[in-house]
Amino acid sequence: MKETFEAWPVIDRTSGGPFALRVTVRRATADDGAAAAELIATAFAGLRCSTYLVPDRRSRHRILAADYRIFVEHALEHGEVHLADDGQAVAVWFERTAELPAPADYDRRLSEATGEWADRFRTLDQLSEQNRPQPPYHHLVFLAVHPDRQNQGLGTALLRYQHARLAGAPAYVEASDPRNRDLYARHGYQPRQPFALPDGALYWPMWRPGDA
């Protein structure tokens, strides 16, 4: 099922002129899994947290995509994956209102995906778990927009799509970049105490309260 949002004005990054954007959002299928993981890796490869996770720039995108694919495939089975403009932006959600199983054979798959950097990914997993609030809530694990389509409202469309479906339930996200943190703040997410990776790269846990 697709949902199209009303047009709103954005600025073309090439010409500098305004144009009307109309965004279509749909739920991903198993056939979209690999492309969604590749998109997240493309969008996140330049973030400071990614340089900690995979210091080797030449292999970073490949390793990130392999790791993200574990979570995308898990969300396709136990959560939801949404695509904007048929793959130019993606949001990965889990509903933490009941016990959520871990990805099948996670430790082996993580080791195979991340190789020599596996312990760094495990460190991030542990920090995320320690700082995560108690359920129930809906967990936005990834929100990524292709670099060529950033600042055009695709992330906003994905957030609006899911927030409209939450029926007043709370939501949670860990922002890994100040710009993303500010986007979530504009959509009602409130910052909690940040935590840091061993190299000092910050994550900002953010909580969007449910309706009273």
Image (tube, rainbow, N blue to C red):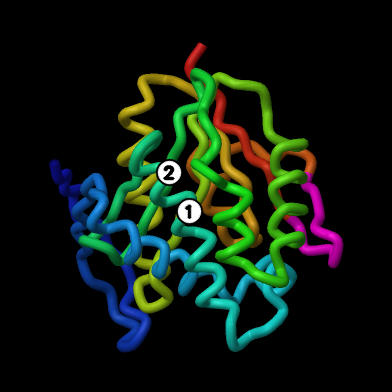
Kind of residue indicated by mark 2: His
For image coordinates 66% across by 22% down, the residue present is 134
Q: Which mark is residue 110?
A: none
Kind of residue indicated by mark 1: Ile
Residue 111 point in image, percent of width and height: 63, 61
Numbered marks: total: 2
Question: Is 123 contained in the magenta span?
Answer: no
Measure how far apart labels 1 and 2 are at the Cα level.
Answer: 6 Å
Residue 3 point in image, percent of width and height: 17, 44
Q: Residues within 10 Å of mark 2 (few under 14, many from 20)?
A: many
- Nearest the viewer among 194 and 20 is 194
Q: Residues within 10 Å of mark 1 (few under 14, many from 20)?
A: some
Q: Which residue is mark 2?
A: 74
Task: From this view, report whether residue 102 is shown above or below residue 145.
Answer: above
Residue 109 location, quadrant: bottom right
Residue located farthest toward the top when viewing the structure as drawn: 212
Whether residue 19 sits left or right of residue 51 in the image: it is: left
Task: From this view, report whether residue 93 is shown above or below residue 72.
Answer: above
Residue 22 point in image, percent of width and height: 19, 58
For image coordinates 68% across by 74% down, the residue present is 54
Whether residue 180 sits left or right of residue 115 in the image: it is: left
One can see residue 153 in this view: no
The boundaries of the magenta stretch are 194-202
Marks 1 and 2 in Cβ contact (< 8 Å): yes
- Nearest the viewer among 63 and 200 is 63
Q: Which residue is mark 1?
A: 70
One can see residue 35 in this view: yes
Q: Quadrant of the N terminus?
A: top left
Q: Main secondary structure of the magenta part?
A: loop
Residue 63 point in image, percent of width and height: 56, 72
